[in-house]
Image: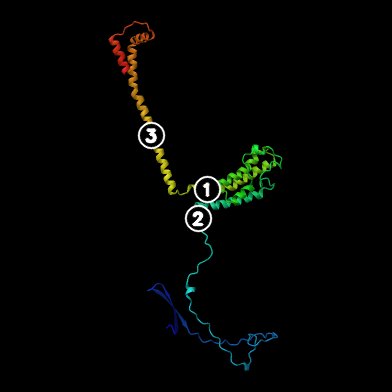
Amino acid sequence: DMGTYDAIGTLLIRGKTSGQLQLWKTYAPAAIVEPEPVSKPVARPSGKVFPGSLTEKVTEDSGPVPEMKPPENFPPSISTLQRRESSRQTKVPSRLEDGDPQAQIDRLMEKCSEILRELQNKDSYKFFLEPVDPVALNLPTYFDIIDEPMDLGTIQKKMNAKEVHSPEEFSGLVRLVFENAIKFNTIPDSVVHLSARNLLGYFNQKYKAIQNALDAAKKNKKMTKAERLEMKRKEKEAAKKKLKEEKDLKRKSTGESGNEPKRARVEDIVASNRSVLDKITAAAQDPNATSQVSRTEFNLLLEMVQN
């Protein structure tokens, strides 16, 4: 038995011939049972009593206490039934960013920025925070020795301007700062030399994790369609080049082996007719020679020339 109730509904129209009807059941409020009075400690009078307020005292002449009405039940409106969309920007989980190469580079560049700040804080002598001023420091040969000056402050400006596009480029710039200092300050015990060597070692240690991440990303990188086509094209070109070299080598070896019998035949003829060739040679060297050549010798010479 569900008792007596009132039905209140809302029709959500979804098209010309369809919709959704939502019904709510409302029951009449149950009778309010007044609790038995409980003795309470007497409170001190507050001094002022405002008529109609909660502090007004109920007397016998004030009449019966009005009955409290239960809260009215209002059916939910269509706007409250609709799903509320969050205006907060949704952050993509890191596991979904792993497939995006640019997202990986952005995360690694953030780590590079952290390493750069650590290097700036560790440069206690402030040797590498600003570009070297050869005039102020009285270093006339600085630009003769250092071809590409670099400092941590310049790297910071490049990072802020998004001019450093990869961790490899960042590491090259940082190493250039300390390698320049070591190259110019050749005395191992000098303060600049020692500071540059210590900071370079610290950087290599901190950058190792980034390098490992880069190596893993390159190993697991999925080639794009263009990269696969380019790789196949290079493989075909390499195969054609190898086949051509093999054919040329085979043709060369075949030609040399085919000329061997001819060369041996000529040598045999020359050896067996040495006397005839000597006469021909002597006649060619002596313009006044009257030696005559027989018909047989002439035919033999003709055969040698033709072969």
In front of the other: label 3 or label 1? Answer: 3
Tell me which numbered mark, 1 or 2, is placed earlier along the sequence: 2
Residue tagged 1: 214
Marks 1 and 2 sit apart, C-alpha to C-alpha, by 15 Å
In front of the other: label 3 or label 2? Answer: 3
Q: Amino acid at mark 3?
A: Lys
Residue tagged 2: 97
Neighbour class for label 2 at 10 Å: few (<14), some, many (≥20)? few
Tell me which numbered mark, 3 or 1, is placed earlier along the sequence: 1
Residue depicted at x 53% and y 51%: 105
Neighbour class for label 3 at 10 Å: few (<14), some, many (≥20)? few
- Asked if residue 8 lies left or right of residue 259, the reply is right
Above or below, comparing residue 1 to residue 236 in the picture: below
Above or below, comparing residue 42 to residue 208 in the picture: below
Residue 285 percent location from the top left of the image = 39, 9
Residue placed furthest toward the bottom: 61
